[in-house]
C-alpha cells in the first residue's frame, strides 16, 4: 500500500481583496455562490484523490503527483467581467465565467494526463462542458496543458446545483515551465523582448522532448518488470 502523503496546495485568492463587499452589489448572494464553488472544488479533489488511490492499488502506480486548487477572488472576478464587458451579477458569473473554481492536477507522465482525464470523465455525475488540448496544440508561447471545464452536482438541503470547475491537467515538466514563465512575465510586467520570448518557447520545446523521453523510459522499465514477473 502506498504510504505517501497526498500533497494538496490551496491557493485561495479571496484574500486579495480586503473589502470585497464593495465590489459586488448583492454581496450575500455572491457569498452563497462562492460557497458552491468551494464545494465543487472539494468534490473534484475527492474524486481525483480516489481515482489516484484506486489506480495505485490496481496498477502499482500513482498517475497524480499532486493537486493544487484555487477560488478566484471577488476582485479578479469583477475585473474579468469588466474586461469582457459583461454584467456584474451572480447570474452573469454563472453563465459566462468557467474558471471561478479551478483545480490543477500535476501528473508524472504525459500518458497519466490523458488517463486521469479519461477516468474522470467516465464518472456518471461529471459532465464535460469544454476541452482545450494545449498539449497536442500548444499555445504560441509554448504553453502546454490539458484544460477541461466540467460540471459537477452539489447537493444542498433544498436543491441540487450543477457547478462548473476548470480542471487543468499537466505533467511536472509542463508545470515547471508554466510556473516560471508566469513569474518571469509578472516580474517583467509583460515587457519581455522578442528574444526572451523565443528563448522561453525553446525551453518549452526542450521540456516537451524531455517529457516524451521520460515517458519512453518509464514504459521500458514497466515492460522489463512485467517480463521478469512472468
Image (tube, rainbow, N blue to C red):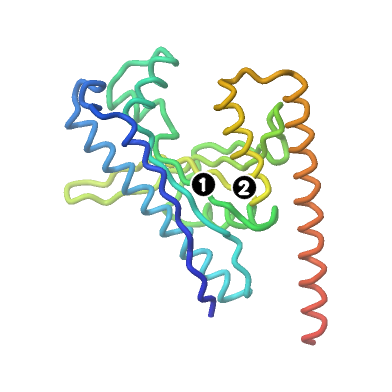
Mark carried by residue 191? none
Mark carried by residue 104? 1
Residue 187, percent from left and from top: 56, 27
Number of numbered labels in the structure image: 2
**Residue at the (20%, 20%) spot, across then down:** 25
Residues 206 and 101: in front is 206
Mark carried by residue 170? 2
Q: Residues within 10 Å of mark 2 (few under 14, many from 20)?
A: many
Relative to residue 52, is residue 45 depicted above or below?
Answer: above
Residue 121, percent from left and from top: 53, 52
Left or right: residue 201 compared with residue 14: right
Residue 87, percent from left and from top: 33, 16
Residues 204 and 188: in front is 188
Relative to residue 158, is residue 224 depicted above or below?
Answer: below
* Quarter residue 108 falls in: bottom right
Kindly check if marks 2 and 1 are in contact, taking CB atoms under 8 A apart as contact.
yes
Which element type, helix, strand or loop, lies under badge 2? Answer: strand
- Quadrant location, the C terminus: bottom right
Label 2 vs 1, first from the N-terminus: 1
Residues 141 and 52: in front is 141
**Residue at the (64%, 51%) spot, across then down:** 172
Relative to residue 140, is residue 115 depicted above or below?
Answer: below
Amino acid at each position: 500500500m502506498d504510504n505517501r502523503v497526498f500533497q494538496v496546495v490551496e491557493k485561495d485568492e479571496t484574500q486579495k481583496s480586503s473589502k470585497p463587499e464593495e465590489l459586488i452589489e448583492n454581496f450575500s448572494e455572491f457569498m452563497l455562490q462562492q460557497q458552491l464553488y468551494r464545494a465543487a472544488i472539494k468534490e473534484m479533489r475527492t474524486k481525483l484523490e480516489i481515482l489516484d488511490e484506486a489506480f495505485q492499488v490496481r496498477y502499482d502506480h500513482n498517475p497524480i503527483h499532486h493537486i493544487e486548487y484555487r477560488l478566484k477572488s471577488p476582485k479578479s472576478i469583477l475585473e474579468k467581467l469588466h474586461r469582457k464587458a459583461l454584467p456584474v451579477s451572480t447570474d452573469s458569473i454563472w453563465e459566462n465565467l468557467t474558471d471561478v473554481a479551478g483545480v490543477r492536477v500535476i501528473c508524472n507522465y504525459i500518458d497519466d494526463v490523458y488517463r486521469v482525464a479519461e477516468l474522470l470523465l467516465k464518472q456518471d455525475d461529471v459532465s464535460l462542458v469544454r476541452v482545450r488540448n494545449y498539449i497536442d496544440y500548444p499555445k504560441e508561447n509554448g504553453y502546454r496543458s490539458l484544460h477541461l471545464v466540467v460540471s459537477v452536482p452539489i447537493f444542498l438541503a433544498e436543491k441540487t446545483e450543477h457547478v462548473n470547475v476548470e480542471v487543468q491537467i499537466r505533467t511536472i515538466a509542463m508545470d515547471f515551465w508554466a510556473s516560471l514563465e508566469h513569474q518571469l512575465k509578472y516580474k517583467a510586467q509583460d515587457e519581455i523582448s522578442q528574444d526572451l520570448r523565443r528563448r522561453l518557447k525553446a525551453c518549452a520545446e526542450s521540456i516537451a522532448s524531455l517529457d516524451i523521453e521520460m515517458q519512453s523510459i518509464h514504459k521500458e522499465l514497466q515492460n522489463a518488470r512485467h517480463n521478469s514477473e512472468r
